[in-house]
Amino acid sequence: MAVKQVTVFIGNEEGRIEKVTEILKNNNININSLSLAESVDFGLLRLIVGEPEKAKDALLAQDLSVRLTDVIAVEIPNHTGSLHSLLTALVDCNIEYMYVLSVGDTASMILRIKDLERAESVIEKAGFHLLGQTEIGA
Amino acid sequence: MIWNETKECMSADEKHTLQSARLVKTVDRVYHNVEFYRKRMQSVGLEPGDITSIDDISKLPYTTKDDLRDNYPFGLFAVPRDQIVRVHASSGTTGKATVVGYTRRDIDIWAECVARCFTGAGITSADIVQVAYGYGLFTGGLGAHYGAEYMGATVVPQSTGNTKKLLTMMEDFGVTAIACTPSYLLHISEVIREEGRLERLKLRTAVCGAEPWTEEMRNVMESELNIKAFDIYGLSEIMGPGVGCDCEFHKGLHVHDDHFYPEIIDPKTLEKVGENVTGELVFTTLTKEGLPLIRYRTKDLTSIEYGKCECGRTQPRIQKFKGRSDDMLIIRGVNVFPSQVEAALLEMGETTPNYMMIVDRVDRQDTLEVQVEVDERYFVDDMRELDNLSKKVVGVLKQALGLAVKVKLVEPKTLPRYEGKGVHVIDNRKLV
């Protein structure tokens, strides 16, 4: 059920993120969500796209460092306390990072958890809807 | 003031006689005691008897740092090992150190040369001299130490690394002279001003060396600290600090040419060039026992002025250094070759071997940033792992260079590629 996240190493220079978005645009790849983690000299740009393999190949062809990482996409209702319920369910799972994905009118969370299978079963037991790659759309 | 007027103010004739006798003896000794020199002389059909005066020196082949490395560690020593009382070492181009050795007499001559330099800077046995060079394999600390002690001054063997403590002692002991690198003295000066300590100090002289510096830096030091600052020159292969020093007239570095014979050559044709023409500085040691060197190519580019100085010394004077004929950098007094960085990265193998070194001077201290490309094969989607990689590179480079380094990870294939020898250094310091 896991979704493939595209992670790109970004040097701390002007125009580097734009370079990534340009490559994706030229390859007709839509970005559904992204997060940027920063260190002093570099950043990691994490992207959720419709066609992660295609995005990876396009970025690699332009000499960027790219990795595909399995992450969880889970839909949560758009009302107060829903994220708290999800995190309560995942209290025993170590979340490395997370960010928000928007598909249509609902909000979804992107979560990176090492023990993916266990987290997924916990999430489903708690009544949340997991999204697959196809539901994210191109 | 002059420490050894007989030697420092010799007439041209006396000097010619002394240098000739000493060269003949040195050549004879290396021919018989060092296989490398014997073979090298034989290869050009030379025998010791062919060298009868200092004028014959241009017949002799050159020696380079590579020769020292190829004969690592003790291969060029001209005395049995048990007569060597000390070794020093400096970094080589491929990580292998260049080792130098001294007999007891070499150490004494070295101490006298440093004493001559310090005396020229106005230091006497009444001074308290704080030696703030690194002590250890680097020649700076012990070289300055022995020289100051030899002339009877009171030595504070401070070494480097703790500026607060240095200043406390400078103040409490009433230190009157300091020996350190020029960039370190500028840093010390800044701390003194920040803390408003100048009034409480008795410092009046600084003898700075181990890295090139400018007239502007001298002006800054002298006006900020209200001292006189002097330039001392040396290289471990020839001896260490004290090969030459400037006097109160600042007309170049007086070379103690009764011990070290300087020449300037064209680094391409290897022909000797005339007075005041810039070329590569070459030294022949005239009295060294442990590690005599014949026509050693320093790779330093400069010119020499002859003739008597206003101070009375008749020694040749090395003029301002104009760079290097190789790619060696001097960063905080440490010799650094770009190839050392490459070798260390290749050995570690977790990045590409492409790199760029950015040298700068921030807050008056030299800084070195090394930009390293993340290797596509080792790239991970984990900030901590990447930070760890960065820290690991810092550790590996610090180990290889003996110098603290800032590391910046950059994207693959963003650093320039070269076929053959490339440009791996951007030096933003203004030194010449």
Image (tube, rainbow, N blue to C red):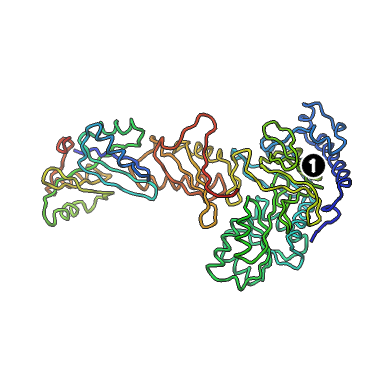
Q: Please name the residue shown 37% across and 39% down the image.
A: B379
Answer left or right for B120 relative to A19: right
Q: Please name the residue shown 76% across and 38% down the image.
A: B294
Q: Is residue B35 visible?
A: no
Q: Please name the residue shown 82% across and 53% down the image.
A: B8
Position of B162 relative to B372 (above/below): below
Position of B217 relative to B57 (above/below): below
Which of the 4 image quarters holds residue B115? bottom right
Which of the 4 image quarters holds residue B285? top right
| Parent chain of label 1 | B
Residue B226 picture location, percent across and down: 64, 67
Residue B251 picture location, percent across and down: 72, 53
Element type at mark 1: loop
Residue closer to the observer: A118 or B63: B63
Residue closer to the observer: B116 or B224: B224
Q: How many marks can you see?
A: 1
Residue that badge 1 annotates: B79
Q: Please name the residue shown 25% across and 39% down the image.
A: A5
Residue B95 picture location, percent across and down: 59, 40
Q: Is residue B247 visible?
A: yes
Answer left or right for B346 relative to B326: left
Residue B314 picture location, percent across and down: 81, 51
* Disc 1 packing (10 Å; few <14; some 14–19; many ≥20): many
Residue type, label 1:
Val
Q: Locate the N terminus of chain B and report the quarter of the image it occupies.
A: bottom right
